[in-house]
Amino acid sequence: MDDEKYPYSSPGYSPDLGEDNRQPVSDDVFGNEENNAIKYKTLSWQLVAVLMIAEIVSNGMLSLPSSLAVVGIVPGVIIIVFLGVFGTFTSWILIQFKLRHPEVHNMGDAGYILAGPIGREILSAGTIIFAIFATGGQLLAGQIALGVLSNNQLCLMLYTGIFAIPTFIFSLPRTLDRLSWLSIPSVISILVAGIIGMVAAGVYPLEGRVISIAVSSDFVTAFVAITNPVFAYAGHFMFFIMISEMRNPADAMKAAYTLQGFATAFYTVFAIVTYYYIGNSVASPSFSSLPPLWAKISFGIAIPNFLIAGSLYSHTAAKLLFVRFFRKSPHLHSHTVLGWSVWVVLIFVMNAAAFVLAVGVPIFNYLIGIAASLFASWYTYGIAGAFWIYDTYRYRGGTEGLRRHGVMTTLCVLTLLAGAFICVAGMYVTVDSIILAYAAGTIAAPFSCG
């Protein structure tokens, strides 16, 4: 696709993708903000790292010990570490693509480069849908936390509504810079909660627990152990939006290294320690396996993380549409009535949709798995391979260029195949789980308190 056909095109970097010949240009998503009332490009790489950690290292990690119970401690740890390293590789590809295409603000813009209007609509819709479902997932995490703290004395739907209110409020800042400062206590809260959870498991180990080195199981059961860490690392779909608000996007990889290093190390330690002291009976979320008092303490401390992670997801869905509506217009950078009205409505719609889905759809937990299979498998892993192949084919000599970079080409093809496998297998496993849940009569009624 030619650059001039792209509606937000800028020359980006030199078509020669050599490391020494790239020349950055000034044109990007937000342009020159020197005289603007609302400035987006204010983030340092350190704050972007905090945003990434707050968004990714959240309730998903509480399912990791149960993954070890399914396949055993050795295969489970190998999967967690491998997916962390794999996520670092795809982070690098995504960031390089963003640096070569500074006009890209979100996955929809990247989809336009790859496949025109159809690609833009598919990847934009996927981003919004996944962000809404992820927000709903955080609302359910908040529901569980509030229920544990109050011994489930209220209707669960009411807990979700209570949690949805601050999630909506924290989503409202127009720039990620404001949310980045809120993300600092968010990161601290999940780190401290995880440490307390591990300490509690060690102080009160489950007597007679069984610890498995490796477990033989059927495909559906075993793949659940893979999907849990896959989705625990899911968050790359926000990278383009975050990098667009950096002062110096060239530093983005520093933030990604910080994220992936922290997430991989913390996930591994948390999963091993919790599983070692609780064994194969560990629940998901794992805090539910702790003694009541310690469960309350761990869930209570983790609440700020659940709140901010949910706010970041709904902010992302709204930001994609807001920038698309007002790109290159005064409403993007000024405090206009129209601009703020549209922004607040978008934030409300995203949070309201997440709330309605979370409390009104009996199989919402399973739908999160379907959404993650459809979109997280590609955004976190698979599609990065397509980005590298596109740029290399276009700027490095077509098929001959791909042959010259055979090792990287092979890795990117395998990345695409991995994304496709996770997508299809994840869908199969989730649909199978829905069928079994209905057969067992464990699906609650819509808008129920149970």
Image (cartoon, rainbow, N blue to C red):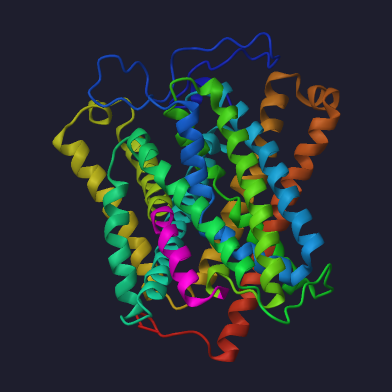
Left or right: residue 56 versus residue 390 is left
Residue 249 visible in the picture: yes
Q: Nearer the viewer, residue 346 or 11?
A: 346
Identified at 35% across, 76% down, the residue is 150
- Rendered location of residue 131, percent (x, y): 45, 53
**Magenta span:** 289-306
- Rendered location of residue 130, percent (x, y): 49, 55
Q: Which quarter of the rendering shows the C terminus?
A: bottom left
Image position of 158 with respect to 258: above or below = below
Q: Nearer the viewer, residue 25 or 250?
A: 250
Q: Nearer the viewer, residue 113 or 213?
A: 213
- Rendered location of residue 234, percent (x, y): 58, 50
* Corner quadrant of residue 28: top left
Residue 290 part of the magenta-drawn span = yes
Identified at 62% across, 34% down, the residue is 257
Q: How many numbered marks have been drawn onto this rendered protein structure?
A: 0
Left or right: residue 150 versus residue 2 is left
- Rendered location of residue 402, percent (x, y): 80, 27
Image position of 125 with respect to 293: above or below = above
* Corner quadrant of residue 399: top right
Q: Which quarter of the rendering shows the N terminus?
A: top right
Residue 349 visible in the picture: no
Magenta stretch, overall SS:
helix
Image position of 191 with respect to 164: above or below = above
Q: Residue furthest left?
A: 337
Image position of 130 with respect to 284: above or below = above
* Corner quadrant of residue 252: top right
Left or right: residue 232 versus residue 156 is right
Q: Residue furthest front?
A: 203
Residue 53 part of the magenta-drawn span = no
Q: Nearer the viewer, residue 321 or 82?
A: 82
